[in-house]
Structure formats: structure tokens, C-alpha cells
Image: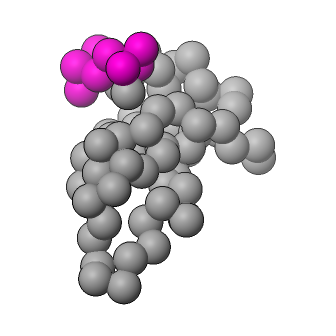
Amino acid sequence: MNWVTLATAPDQIVAEMWREMLVAEGVPAALRPGDTTSFLGVTLLPCRVLVADKELARAKELLEDQMGVDLDEA
């Protein structure tokens, strides 16, 4: 499976919420591992959400419709 960046969330908590919604809708999704590495636990830095390349269009639609994300800004 080839992974592509769907969007960059403002922090890890938001990225986790987006990922969970996508997975619940049947879209394979993950967080970029390097973005979530923090010796303090959860990072407050921007975090990229990855999806399977063949699901990119559907993932964009879901993120915009269900989470109200404007992907021109995310």
C-alpha cells in the first residue's frame, strides 16, 4: 500500500481524531511516525495524516464533510 499525505493537523490530538474518523469509515489512515515522536508524550506540533493513495479523494471528502476541515488551509 502506498501512503500519501492527506492533511497536516495542528497537533497530534486533532490528527488522532481525524485518523479515527477515517478508519471508522473504512479508509486506511495513519499518522506520520516522525511527527508524533515526543519524549513528553503527546506532541503539540503539527502532525501529518496519511491515507492509502487509492483512498485520497474519498478521505478528502470525509474530512471536509464530517470534520469541517478546509483542506486548502489544513
Q: Depth check: 45 or 58 in front?
A: 45
Work out whether residue 63 can be spotted.
Answer: yes
User: In the rendered view, would you say 14 is above or below 39?
Assistant: above
Residue lying at the far bottom of the rendered structure = 39
Residue at the front extreme of this rendering: 45
The spot of residue 68 in percent (x, y) is: 23, 19
Q: Residue at x 48, y 44 (%)?
A: 49
Question: At which x and y percent is residue 4?
Answer: 66, 37
Which residue is at the front of the view, 22 or 34?
34
Q: Per the image, is 70 magenta?
A: yes
Q: Does the magenta stretch include residue 68?
A: yes
Answer yes or no: is residue 20 visible: no
From the viewer's perspective, tell me whether residue 1 is left or right of residue 56.
right
Residue 19 horizontal side relative to residue 43, left or right: right
Q: Please provide percent x and percent y for residue 73.
A: 36, 20
Name the quadrant containing residue 18.
top left
Which quadrant of the figure has residue 70? top left
The answer to whether residue 55 is above or below residue 30 is above
Residue drawn at 76 percent across, 43 percent down:
2
> Which stretch did the figure color magenta?
65-73
The answer to whether 15 appears left or right of 29 in the picture is: left
| Vertical comparison of 69 with 25: above or below | above
Q: Is the magenta stretch mostly helix, strand or loop?
A: loop
- Position above or below: 44 against 50: below
